[in-house]
Image (cartoon, helix red, strand yellow):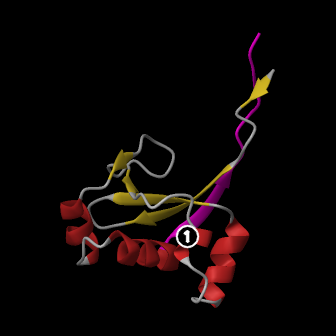
Amino acid sequence: MPRGNAGQTKVHYQGTEEDFVIFVDDIEQVQKWKNDRSIPLAQVVSGFKIFVTHKHGAQNAHDAASKQTLDAEFGTSNEDECMVKILEKGDVQATEVRLRFTI
């Protein structure tokens, strides 16, 4: 039975001290949001959580970003404001997840 058949789309932002990642629904929604800011963030992001990768790029382990880390990088610990900055300046990356079969 196949499992894990979905791709992942994320936005990677390389900060001065940390790399930040947020997961989004798809590339198209991010582009629509960039052109029309009246689109709610809830229709763009997959969850209201910001992750850090400890300067290991977008492909490594993700830990939750602390308010202190967000404030140091973005000048605010408000996650909505930080997500806007990540969406504006980050790189959108889509990956395909291979099928896994269980018996």
Q: Is residue 56 left or right of residue 78?
A: right
Q: Which residue is mark 1?
A: 42
Judged from this view, the residue extending furthest toward the right is 1
Residue 49 place in picture, x, y as percent: 42, 57
Instruction: Say which residue appears at 20% left-offset and 69% top-offset.
Output: 72
User: Is 71 above or below relative to 7?
Assistant: below
Q: Position of residue 60 (x, y in %)?
A: 46, 42
Vertical placement of 63 versus 98: above or below? Answer: below
**Quarter-of-image position of residue 37:** bottom right
Task: Look at label 1 and name its amino acid.
Answer: Ala
Please state which of residues 3 and 18 is positioned toward the viewer in this rendering. Answer: 3
Q: Is residue 75 above or below residue 55?
A: below
| 40 part of magenta stretch | no
Residue at 68% x, 63% y is: 26
Over which residues does the magenta segment extend?
Answer: 90-103
Quadrant placement of the N terminus: top right
Q: Quadrant of residue 5?
A: top right
Total marks in image: 1
Rendered location of residue 90, percent (x, y)? 50, 71
Q: Residues within 10 Å of mark 1 (few under 14, many from 20)?
A: few
SS for tag 1? helix
Above or below, 40 against 52 in this view is below
Q: Give whichever of 98, 49 is nearer the camera.
A: 49
Residue that appears at 51% across and 45% down:
59
Residue 43 image offset from top left, x and y in percent? 62, 71
**Quadrant placement of the C terminus:** top right
Is residue 41 found left or right of 18 in the rendered image?
A: right
In this rendering, position of residue 82 left or right of residue 26: left
**Magenta highlight on residue 98:** yes
